[in-house]
Image (tube, helix red, strand yellow):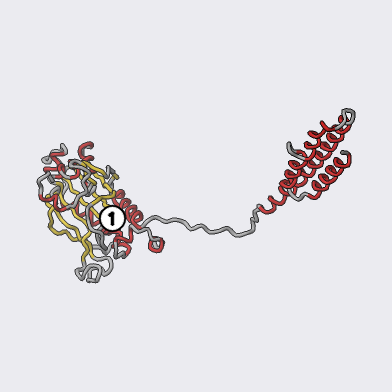
Amino acid sequence: MNEKLSIIREEALAAVKAASSTAELNDIRVRVLGKKGELTAILRSMGSLAPEDRPKVGQMVNEARAEIESAVEARTAALAAQERDARLKAEALDVTIPGKKRPLGKLHPLTQTYYEMRDIFVGMGFTVAEGPEVEYDKYNFTMLNIPKDHPARDMQDTFYVNDDIVLRTHTSPVQVRTMLSQKPPIRIISPGRVYRSDDVDATHSPIFNQIEGLVIDKGVTMADLRGVLDVFAKELYGEHTKTRLRPSYFPFTEPSAEVDLSCMACGGKGCRICKGSGWIEILGSGMVNPKVLEMCGIDPEVYSGFAFGIGIDRVCNAKFGISDIRLLYENDLRFLSQF
């Protein structure tokens, strides 16, 4: 028994000394000192010894256990320090290494265009008003002089949620909500996404963006509308830009006009972009229909006003020379990184 204990002790101490990691030391601890370890096995076999030999053997086992535990603890502390030093060395940060340049995001061309348009109108005294994209038919059509049986509803292919709720086809409902909640004078722009059931191609999308403007006050005339749009065009495209109004029809304005700008690419000489005409249609406008004012609780005998609607996508494409509206929505970084 003495010889067996001596062998276990010497082998354990040698293994502890030779251990190169704390994991190896743990294995040694379990193999020698654990519940099923070599020293524990000797203690369990003491029943076969003579009663007078048991105390001596128990003392020898305890001494061997204490010596091995002490060696394991000392070696564990040394190896843990070595492992910590190695880990810290491996994780050290070399502050002299040049940093990695992270690519920065940029504003989407539509957002850039909207911000520029918004700032122009805000500079003329307009405020920004917003409203829901899922809208009541009442605000999207009826109160804009487009009742249920009105043929003008055929001019816009609408996404219906149900008979009374639609995805707004323009931001004009924001104008209606503003007139219902605010007394004149009113001078607002209402930007946002709008929805129409169009087939997707280079010039059409079921989702696009608009800015609509509304001015209501005493003595507002068509000349005021022309002046505002002329200032807007020159601020956006340059002092050389000219505007042209053509008679048109919209149920919520009377009279109504389409507004053309002299082509930004050729300066009005005629090119591929303007199809040789020298002009590009940019927006619809007109004087607010008296019926709309009445439905919104504004006396048309006292107040008058004008409204206009501009497609942000169309302005963006004209400004940057983009030929396909789909490029604005495909999130292709090769395209977006140019702006």
In this orientation, which residue lies closer to the viewer: 29 or 153? 29
Asked if 229 appears above or below 23 in the picture, the reply is: below
In the picture as drawn, the residue positioned furthest to the top comes out as 51
Describe the element under mark 1 as helix, strand or loop: helix
Residue at the location (22% across, 44% down)?
Answer: 161
Say what amino acid the circle numbered 1 marks.
Ile
How many numbered callouts?
A: 1
Give residue 130's quadrant in the image.
top left
Q: Is residue 6 visible?
A: yes
Asked if 119 appears above or below 237 in the picture, the reply is: above
* Residue tagged 1: 312
Residue 282 at what x, y percent from top left?
A: 23, 59
Give residue 259's quadrant in the image.
bottom left
Q: Quadrant of the C terminus?
A: bottom left
In this orientation, which residue lies closer to the viewer: 244 or 201? 201
In this orientation, which residue lies closer to the viewer: 171 or 233? 171
Q: Is residue 237 visible?
A: no
Residue 54 at what x, y percent from top left?
A: 86, 30
- Crowding at dot 1, Cα within 10 Å, few <14 / some 14-19 / many 20+, comes out as many
Asked if 162 appears above or below 234 in the picture, the reply is: above
Left/right placement of residue 257 relative to residue 23 reads: left
Residue 319 at what x, y percent from top left?
A: 31, 62
Left/right placement of residue 74 relative to residue 92 reads: right
Residue at the location (79% across, 42% down)?
Answer: 72
Give residue 290's quadrant in the image.
top left
Residue 20 at what x, y percent from top left?
A: 76, 50
Q: Quadrant of the N terminus?
A: top right
Left/right placement of residue 104 relative to residue 62 reads: left
